[in-house]
Image (cartoon, helix red, strand yellow):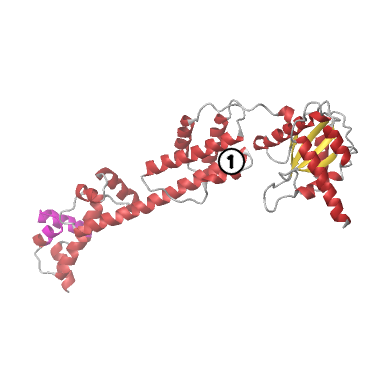
């Protein structure tokens, strides 16, 4: 029962601190907050009161550091007069008298002796009176949000946070440059470098609101997909990552890593789909060549597979190592060998049926491929 009473009393103290620090005190009631603190056993006398917010490592993750464990570690290190509280966001707040600018850094370092991973801390400016501590609390929250740019596990003072810049327009030209560099990249590291340069350009004039970074990222990824699928002339494919997972990235560096991996996976998947599509086209083309070898030409077969003759010829070289004509010649000679083995057709008749009007030219090609003339081949098969 004692434990329950203690927990209840702690909850009351937290609620008073959270409520008092979350809004500006009404004019004429400057002493209201101090009186509320006194009622829950907190000495309201603070010299230049200030607020710091400690965010547990892995905040929001199932296996992350808990606010309770962080608060427990903090309470063992707090000097007299400082008081901790847990807010609705799962962060541990600290209301204290401002002694020096390095006091929080020292406390943060001491936490490293009892915690595996250090929390991220946002620190507001000191105030002249307790009634204005809400402003320091708001500043601490703003400083903590800047962890997106500064990274996790450090101490961020509001006084050191640069003002946010406005995003004038979406950097469409930079998206185009990123796409061109991605397509030329031979290694994932080159894509990562291009992504890093994209964000450097985006933030050239200073940091912008984090929500705007996310919005630009989503638009950029959608634009990159559209460009890639259009250039590749392949249907949109399903890749491992969901685009909206970018909102789960806590820092700019994590966003950059996510985007670089996303684009690398996207490019690899589209290239795979292209190869599969090309393989299917080559198979269909060879099927047409085999069934229509007597009249097949590059132009006629290209029409059957809805491609230009030039592009189809290129696909053959890339995917088979042969030219279209070399493939067609092999098909015609194989069919001619079959007829010479299994029919009594004369050589000129075999030549015509596989697409050669000049029987003398047919004989030259046949001997070059087989090593025997058509007549010699037929005789060898009859022995």
Q: Specify the segment rendered in magenta.
A: 350-369
Q: How many marks?
A: 1
Please give the name of the residue rendered at 52% of the width and 44% of the height, measured from the top-left corner: 188
Q: Is residue 5 left or right of residue 164?
A: right
Label the magenta part by its dominant secondary structure.
helix
* Relative image position of residue 239 (x, y in whole percent): 48, 50
As helix, strand or loop, the secondary structure at mark 1 comes to helix
The relative height of residue 219 versus residue 306 in the rendered view (above or below) is: above
The relative height of residue 78 versus residue 319 in the rendered view (above or below) is: above
Q: Is residue 27 left or right of residue 79?
A: left
Quarter occupied by residue 333 = bottom left
* Relative image position of residue 235 (x, y in whole percent): 38, 48
The verdict on residue 151 being magenta is no
Quarter occupied by residue 135 = top right
The verdict on residue 356 being magenta is yes
The single residue placed furthest to the bottom in the displayed view is 383
Crowding near the residue tagged with mark 1, few <14, some 14–19, many ≥20 C-alpha atoms within 10 Å? many
Which one is in front, 140 or 44? Answer: 44
Please give the name of the residue rendered at 13% of the width and 69% of the height, measured from the top-left corner: 343
Please give the name of the residue rendered at 84% of the width and 55% of the height, measured from the top-left corner: 4
Query: Disc 1 designates what residue?
Result: 255
The relative height of residue 118 versus residue 141 in the rendered view (above or below) is: below
Which one is in front, 375 or 291? Answer: 291
Please give the name of the residue rendered at 34% of the width and 54% of the height, measured from the top-left corner: 279
Specify whether residue 9 is in view.
yes
Which one is in front, 201 or 127? Answer: 127
Quarter of the figure with the C terminus: bottom left
* Relative image position of residue 267 (x, y in whole percent): 46, 45
Q: Is residue 354 left or right of residue 95?
A: left
Specify whether residue 156 is in view.
no
Quarter of the figure with the N terminus: bottom right
């Amino acid at each position: 029962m004692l434990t329950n009473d203690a927990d209840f009393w702690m909850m009351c103290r937290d609620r008073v601190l959270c409520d008092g620090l979350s809004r500006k005190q009404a004019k004429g009631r400057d002493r209201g907050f101090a009186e509320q603190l006194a009622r829950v056993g907190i000495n309201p006398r603070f010299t230049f009161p200030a607020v710091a917010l400690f965010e547990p490592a892995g905040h929001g993750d199932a296996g992350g550091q808990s606010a309770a464990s962080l608060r427990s570690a903090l309470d063992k290190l707090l000097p007299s007069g400082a008081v901790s509280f847990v807010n609705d966001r799962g962060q541990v707040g600290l209301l204290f008298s401002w002694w020096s600018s390095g006091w929080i850094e020292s406390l943060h370092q001491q936490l490293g002796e009892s915690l595996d991973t250090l929390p991220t801390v946002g620190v507001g400016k000191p105030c002249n009176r307790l009634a204005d501590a809400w402003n320091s609390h708001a500043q601490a929250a703003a400083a903590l949000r800047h962890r997106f740019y500064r990274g996790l596990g450090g101490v961020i003072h509001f006084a050191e946070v640069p003002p946010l810049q406005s995003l004038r327009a979406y950097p469409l030209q930079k998206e185009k440059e990123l796409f061109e560099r991605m397509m030329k990249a031979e290694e994932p590291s080159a894509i990562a470098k291009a992504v890093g340069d994209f964000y450097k350009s985006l933030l050239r004039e200073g940091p912008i609101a984090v929500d705007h970074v996310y919005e630009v990222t989503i638009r950029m990824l959608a634009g990159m997909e559209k460009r890639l699928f259009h250039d590749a002339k392949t249907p949109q494919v399903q890749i491992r990552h969901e685009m909206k997972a970018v909102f789960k990235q806590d820092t700019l560096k994590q966003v950059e890593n996510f985007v670089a991996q996303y684009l690398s996976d996207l490019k690899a998947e589209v290239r795979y789909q292209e190869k599969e599509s090309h393989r299917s086209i080559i198979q269909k083309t060879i099927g047409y060549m085999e069934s229509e070898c007597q009249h097949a030409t590059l132009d006629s077969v290209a029409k059957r597979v809805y491609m230009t003759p030039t592009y189809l010829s290129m696909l053959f070289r890339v995917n088979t190592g042969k030219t279209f004509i070399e493939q067609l010649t092999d098909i015609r000679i194989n069919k001619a060998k079959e007829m010479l083995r299994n029919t009594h057709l004369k050589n000129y008749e075999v030549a015509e049926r596989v697409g050669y009007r000049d029987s003398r030219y047919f004989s030259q090609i046949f001997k070059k491929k087989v090593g025997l003339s058509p007549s010699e081949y037929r005789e060898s098969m009859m022995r």
